[in-house]
Amino acid sequence: MIDSFLLEFMIIGVLGVGSQWISWRLRLPAIVVMSIAGLLSGPIFHIINPEQDFGELYRPFISVAVAIILFEGSLNLDIKEIRGLGRPVMRIVTFGASISWVLGSLAAHYVAGLSWAVSFVIGAILIVTGPTVILPLLRQSKLKPRPAKILKWEGIIVDPFGALLAVFAFEAIVFMLGDGGSGVSLLIFCLGAVFAVILGVVFGKAIGWMFEAGHMPEFLKSPSMFIAVIACFALADEVAHETGLLAVTAMGMKLANMRIASIQDMRHFKENISMLLTSAIFVMLTASLTRDTLVDVFQVEIIGFVLLMLFIVRPLSIFLSTFGTDLTNREKLLVGWIAPRGIVALTVASYFASVLLEEGFGDAAIITSLTFALVFFTVCAHGFSIGWLARKLDLSSEEQPGILMIGSNSFTVALSQLLKEAEIPNLVTDSSWRRLSRARNAGINFHYGDILSEKTEYGLDMTPYNYLLAATENDSYNSLVCTTFVPEFGRSNVYKINTHGASDQADDLVSTIGGRLLFSKQDTLESLIHKIDAGHVLRKTNITNQYTYDQYIEERDLHTILLFIVKQSKKIEFFVDNETVEAEPGDVVISLTPPSKEFDKIRAKLAEQRDAKADETKEEQ
């Protein structure tokens, strides 16, 4: 066991971030890898035990971290996002959660063998999914917008209500068992929940007003927001236990719908903090479990309860609550299967296990094992199956990485036509209806609107596109677009085409920021458009064992511009200025070549030169 607190803190960070990297590298569910890392370092090999070593700081740290994660998730809950989905979302988070509570309680009593009192508490706790598990799954699976939005909204909204329902159930049970003071406690709790919502809205309104009115300098906005979240959570939780999560959710939703520009700027910072905290907490929670808890997981009653929750309770609650809505059966099936439990379920369950034991409910001893079993099995089952099931139901957008092109012109339209023939998803966007005329006439996919506008953000589905190509006539705008979408697409997947020649020094600064510069500085957008208008064509060249990439490079005309390579794995690799890209057998090279007749003449001339060189070599021998 590690004795140094600092060393243990370092190990938790390395395991958390390392698990995220391994999951990205091996395309595995991150929450599964993090859980396994925690179990190996904790109860299995006894390297760390955060709950024991952190002492009294353990639970406050977990609680504050969960509050920050939930707040970051609620910052993305803009009402505009669920236009057309408001009815199913509302029914899932109300009727669906209620049905899940009742059915889960029945399963806990009749299958797991818990008393009615403990069953209703655990049933309330286990309605939660939460952003700590749902958001990593959504990032991994690339679902289509409708099911993705439903799962995200359900996870973030129901998360605090699970804890609230558990407290309500506990207070109600104690009251019904005859404790005269519990009626007052129940009333105080209900008033505390109302207070938490009001407090969250007030905090959100106040922070938003200070930012918008300029009463907070830019360098203090992120720290002040951070402290405000902790203050809002702590104040609400002091008034009524477990209402802090409700307060920060209300605060985040209020800010998300105030349309404050600086909030958008800080969102990426919050996402990074949330990612780090999620990684650390999963490792800490699983590393703090005991071997006895792991052994109890394999009890027949617990396994039966988990299977019932997976295959009966969740699907039934979704199908019943969404009856009569516009959700398709495929969407209901996917949403009805995906419900991984996470941090909030584990933390709240461990709290109520001790409270119920103090109240004399001996069967509450297995609550932690029961909850961990459901958390681990749902994380594994849903983490490994969400991508496969989404593809089977045609609700996934990850079959072939697509390209989003900003700017309609001869080059982007020609490229879009070639991509369409190759069955590669692509879209041309432009804010000018006149410039889009060529795209409309060509019959390709296009979108009319400014890619940076809020209307486009909510009206355009970007899920099918893994790469962004900025190809407008304005270098500064291209750089701004690339910089804006770096967090969403990734820095290595955001590109722009130079609009000026290599000798133009006026835009040297612009060319160093934003996206990666495609092709070379000499291959400007103007020259590419000119070549297309002059009859140059886009060609696909298959690289094989017989016709290698080296042979292709040797024979190609100097006027041919290499654009990108479609790898066998469907990944697209662009030719970038000052970088080398290699094609292998099975790959396809996309290039811009001279007109056909001219191209044939050049290839014939190159063949003659190659034959002549071969003859010279033979004579020398």
Image (spheres, grey):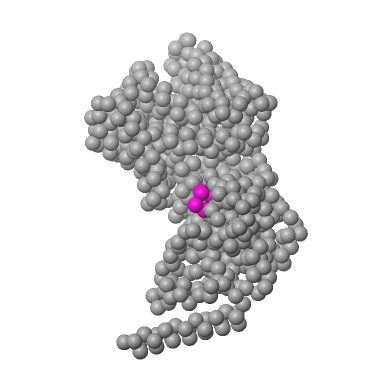
Q: Position of residue 308 (x, y in %)?
A: 40, 41
Q: How many marks?
A: 0
Relative to 498, say whether 188 is above or below: above
Q: Which SS type dominates the magenta stretch? A: helix
Does 178 appear above or below 112?
A: above
Residue at the top extreme of this rendering: 180
Query: In which quarter of the view is residue 445 placed?
Result: bottom right
**Residue 600 x %, y %:** 56, 82
Residue drawn where x is 38% and y is 40% of the image: 17
Q: Position of residue 588 (x, y in %)?
A: 48, 69
Q: Is residue 545 above or below residue 392?
A: below
Identify the residue at image location x=60%, y=37%: 264
Q: Residue furthest right?
A: 434
Which residue occupies 39% across, 86% down? Answer: 616
Does 19 sit left or right of 566 as displayed?
A: left
Left or right: where 502 falls relative to 393: right
The answer to which of 118 and 219 lies nearer the viewer is: 219
Residue 587 in view here: yes
The quarter of the rendered structure image containing the C terminus is: bottom left
Q: Which image quarter: residue 435? A: bottom right
Is residue 492 located in the magenta-colored stretch of the structure?
yes
Q: What residue do we see at 36% from left, 85% from top?
A: 617
Q: Quadrant of residue 46?
A: top left
| Residue 70 in the figure: left or right of residue 499 | left
The magenta region covers 488-493
Split into 4 quadrants, where in the image is the N terminus? Answer: top left
Q: Would residue 262 be counted in the magenta stretch?
A: no
Name the one closer to the observer, 481 or 568. Answer: 481
Asked if one can make out residue 571 in the rendered structure from this viewpoint, the answer is: no
Residue nearest the viewer, comparing 109 with 415: 415
On the rendered structure, is 104 left or right of 156? left
| Along the viewing direction, whichever of 579 and 36 lies nearer the viewer | 579
